[in-house]
């Protein structure tokens, strides 16, 4: 049990961006590479958890010993997460698009009808479901520990603290994704390293800048510790 503290636990991890279609060849997306979420899935598996990784479109290899469900849109990601329940742990590291196009075109949008130019399309967006808030909502299927991420460009800890309460998760991992963030280098999205703050009900811990694999290992160790001692959360 010492070597595999999460043995017998099921962990659900989201990772990567979502792609929200505009038409059959265009989409709305962001710069998430999936590196952080995939590293968390791998770290939890190394501690003995059975891991379901629900991933948006990424170019990374599947982590070893992890069951991967590939999705494209936020709605598909939510459905895959709900299908994977029950879980003891949920970690939402995906950069889910907040909006999708209300009525994606079924054919490629054209710039011109023959010689006549067509006015630029106006996209109407509608909000996507919030996967983290849905998983964290009270109910019989709520995982014992729900961990969110907060990508912020200013007042990182303050905004993330508010976000933890609003979304109802137990912990939130805040990262500065501004150009000046991540120890002054920017590039949290898609980069190799992450500078994060772990915000729990008992306060905020500042972690040093680390490779995303090291952030994942430290987070997984914390998760294993809290599940072994639920009175500490
Ligand atoms: O993938 P990488 O290139 O390694 O980059 C890692 C990362 C920067 C993407 C990652 O560390 C990170 O911060 N992920 C969360 C990004 C994000 O969308 O943050 P947010 O503040 O917009 O969302 C807050 C939380 O709600 C997140 O846990 C997010 O997964 C979740 N969310 C958001 C919107 C939505 N519709 N559903 C959600 O579940």
Image (cartoon, rainbow, N blue to C red):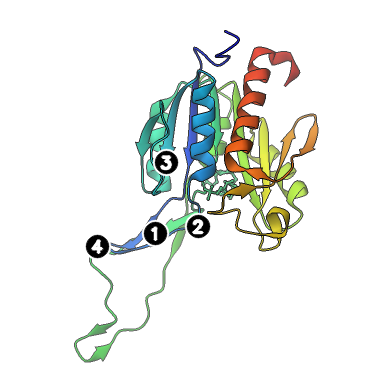
Label 2, label 4: how far apart the Cα atoms are: 25 Å
Label 1, label 3: how far apart the Cα atoms are: 23 Å
Q: Regarding mark 2 in the picture, which secondary structure is present there?
A: loop
Residue contact at pointers 3 and 4, CB within 8 angstroms: no
Residue at the image position 78 percent from the left and 36 percent from the top: 205
Residue contact at pointers 2 and 4, CB within 8 angstroms: no
Would you call the spot at circle 2 few (<14 residues within 10 Å), some (14-19), or many (20 or more)? some
Q: Regarding mark 3 in the picture, which secondary structure is present there?
A: strand
Question: Mark 4 = which residue?
Answer: 106
Q: In this orientation, which residue lies closer to the viewer: 96 or 142?
A: 96
- Looking at this rendering, what residue extends furthest in the top direction? 1
Indicate left or right for 127 with 156 as reference.
left
Sequence-earlier tag: 2 or 1: 2
Q: In this orientation, which residue lies closer to the viewer: 159 or 187?
A: 187
Question: x, y percentage for residue 127?
Answer: 49, 53
Question: Mark 1 = which residue?
Answer: 102
For the residues carrying marks 2 and 1, which lies nearer the camera in this image? 2
In the picture, the quarter occupied by the C terminus is: top right
Q: Is mark 2 within 8 Å of ligand 1?
A: yes
| Quadrant assignment, res 223 | top right
Sequence-earlier tag: 3 or 2: 2
Question: Mark 2 = which residue?
Answer: 31
Question: Mark 3 = which residue?
Answer: 55
Residue contact at pointers 3 and 2, CB within 8 angstroms: no
Indicate left or right for 119 with 220 as reference.
left
In the picture, the quarter occupied by the N terminus is: top right
């Amino acid at each position: 049990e010492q070597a595999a503290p999460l043995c017998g636990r099921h962990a659900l991890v989201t990772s990567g961006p979502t792609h929200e279609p505009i038409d059959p060849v265009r989409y709305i997306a962001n710069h998430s590479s999936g590196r952080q979420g995939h590293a968390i899935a791998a770290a939890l598996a190394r501690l003995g958890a059975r891991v379901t990784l629900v991933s948006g479109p990424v170019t990374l290899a599947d982590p070893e010993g992890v069951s991967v469900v590939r999705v494209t849109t936020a709605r598909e990601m939510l459905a895959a997460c709900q299908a994977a329940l029950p879980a003891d742990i949920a970690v939402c590291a995906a950069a889910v698009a907040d909006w999708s196009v209300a009525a994606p075109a079924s054919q490629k949008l054209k710039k011109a009808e023959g010689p006549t130019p067509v006015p630029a399309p106006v996209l109407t967006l509608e909000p996507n479901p919030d996967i983290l808030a849905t998983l964290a909502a009270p109910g019989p299927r709520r995982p014992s520990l729900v961990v969110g991420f907060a990508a912020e460009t200013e007042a990182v800890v303050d905004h993330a603290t508010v976000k933890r309460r609003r979304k109802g998760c137990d912990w939130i991992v805040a990262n500065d994704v501004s150009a000046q963030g991540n120890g002054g280098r920017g590039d949290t999205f898609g980069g190799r390293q992450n500078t994060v703050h772990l915000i729990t009900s008992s306060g905020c811990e500042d972690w040093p800048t680390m490779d995303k694999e090291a952030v994942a290992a430290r987070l997984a160790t914390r998760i294993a510790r809290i599940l072994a001692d639920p009175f500490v959360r």
